[in-house]
Image (tube, rainbow, N blue to C red):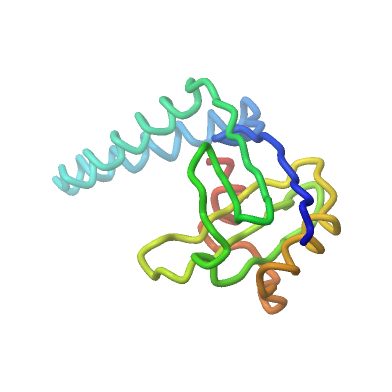
């Protein structure tokens, strides 16, 4: 039995590099949406705009924590939570440096969301070869999810 084990750490939140222009245009957008909400007397929409602005502000000032991730013959472990390979349906890799370098796991339970793990500087071939001994690989997944791509492009 293969006893190879791979571990690495990654930040729990990837802070995007935002320029001064990003803050200016985002501020203009939020104030424009807030003015629209007031003009149309849509106060619920205005409240949502304010809440989104507060969430972006909090996330921008939040200190990132390190997340430990391990692949072993027993399964995967993330921040002390163990998932056996029996719980995981499949995995896939998206590797398009420098923007996208992620490892994904789809679970058999439909209520559990897809797990996305940043590869950072890990060798994707070594990880792929290790995981292929335990899990099927989904070769049809070629793009990141729409929400991840949108968050990356808009630097959210």
Residue 5 appears left or right of 110: right
- Image position of 23 with respect to 132: above or below: above
Looking at the rendered structure, the number of numbered marks drawn on it comes to: 0
- Image position of 93 with respect to 40: above or below: below
Residue 91 appears left or right of 97: left
Residue 121 appears left or right of 49: right
Residue 143 or 66: which is nearer the viewer?
66
Quadrant in the rendering for residue 7: top right
Q: Residue 106: x and y, percent?
A: 54, 66
Q: Residue 49: x and y, percent?
A: 30, 40
Residue under the point 16% across and 48% down: 42
Q: Residue 100: x and y, percent?
A: 72, 52
Residue under the point 54% across and 63% down: 146
Quadrant in the rendering for residue 11: top right
Residue under the point 79% across and 58% down: 2
Residue 97 or 65: which is nearer the viewer?
65
Give the residue furthest to the front.
Answer: 1
Residue under the point 53% across and 29% down: 24
Residue 109 or 20: which is nearer the viewer?
109
Quadrant in the rendering for residue 8: top right
- Image position of 3 with respect to 136: above or below: above
Q: Residue 133: x and y, percent?
A: 75, 68
- Image position of 44 with respect to 113: above or below: above
| Position of the N terminus by quadrant | bottom right
């Amino acid at each position: 039995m293969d006893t190879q084990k791979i571990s690495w750490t990654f930040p729990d939140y990837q802070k995007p590099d935002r320029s001064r222009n990003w803050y200016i245009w985002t501020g203009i957008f939020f104030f424009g949406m807030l003015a629209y909400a007031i003009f149309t007397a849509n106060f619920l929409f205005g409240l949502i705009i304010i809440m989104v602005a507060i969430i972006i502000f909090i996330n921008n000032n939040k200190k990132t924590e390190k997340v430990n991730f391990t692949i072993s013959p027993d399964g995967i472990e993330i921040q002390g939570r163990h998932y056996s390979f029996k719980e995981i349906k499949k995995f896939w890799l998206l590797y398009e440096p420098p923007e996208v370098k992620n490892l994904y796991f789809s679970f058999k339970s439909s209520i559990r969301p897809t797990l996305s793990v940043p590869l950072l500087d890990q060798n994707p071939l070594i990880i792929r070869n290790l995981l292929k001994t335990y899990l099927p690989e989904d070769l049809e997944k070629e793009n990141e999810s729409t929400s991840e791509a949108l968050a990356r492009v808009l630097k959210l």
